[in-house]
Amino acid sequence: MPYDLIFRDPVRTYSDTPSFATQLVNMLQTSFALVKQHLEKSAEEVSKYQIELPKSKQIVVGDLVYLDTPKIRIRTSKELAKLNYGPFRVIKQFFSVMFEIQHVNKQRVHLKRLVKVAVRQVFPDELRISRPLPPTTVIISNFNFVFDMTGKSNRWRFELRGRTFLQTCDVDVG
């Protein structure tokens, strides 16, 4: 006969200890309390740090956004596939990362799928010039261009100069 069958420890069953259920409940309650305490502590530590979002993810209600729909078509590389659809306007913000966009079905979208439309900045030199410009002469190698954009006339004068000739051409613009 095998040694284990002759000299093994007596097997305990749950019926041997009527207080086993109460001991199990007490151990589970203390372990759940300990888990809850650790979760609350780690949540407090994480909430101390403010997560900075990039400018493309700082979205508020009314912004124009593109919707990222990762769909790779057959025989099209990921770089050439059009992944962003839109632009759509943000209608409502449910949480800091959940938005509703102005779509056919008023879709709820996570922040990860939205890309903010870059607003084009207007620089001072791009503004419409209200004062008249003086006649300007531009010399490019052998060509001499005279522009008269004073607002009084819409005529441009082109002079083509060579070593032995001078060709003049007046053009009406407008």
Image (spheres, helix red, strand yellow):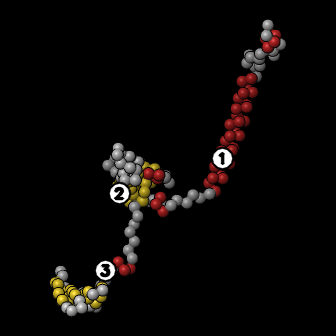
In this view of the protein, which residue sits in the foreground, 13 or 171? 171
User: For residue 87, which numbered disc appears in the image?
Assistant: 2
Q: Pointer 1: residues within 10 angstroms few (<14), some, or many (20+)?
A: few
Marks 3/2: CA–CA distance: 28 Å
Q: Earlier in the sequence, mark 3 or mark 2?
A: 2
Q: Give the Cα distance between marks 3 and 1.
A: 59 Å
Image spot of residue 6 (x, y percent): 81, 10
Say above or below: 92 vs 26: below
Amino acid type for the residue under numbered disc 3: Arg
SS assignment at label 1: helix
Q: Mark 3 points at which residue?
A: 128
On the rendered image, what quadrant is the N terminus found in? top right
Q: What residue type is labelled 1?
A: Glu
Q: Which mark is residue 40?
A: 1
User: Which secondary structure, mark 3?
Assistant: loop
User: Residue shown at 26%/91% (left/top)?
Assistant: 135
Query: Picture quarter containing residue 4?
Result: top right
In this rendering, the count of numbered labels is: 3
Residue at 48% from the left image edge and 62% from the top image edge = 55
Q: Where is residue 26 in the image (x, y as percent from the top left)?
A: 73, 31
Query: The residue tagged with tag 2: helix, strand or loop?
Result: strand
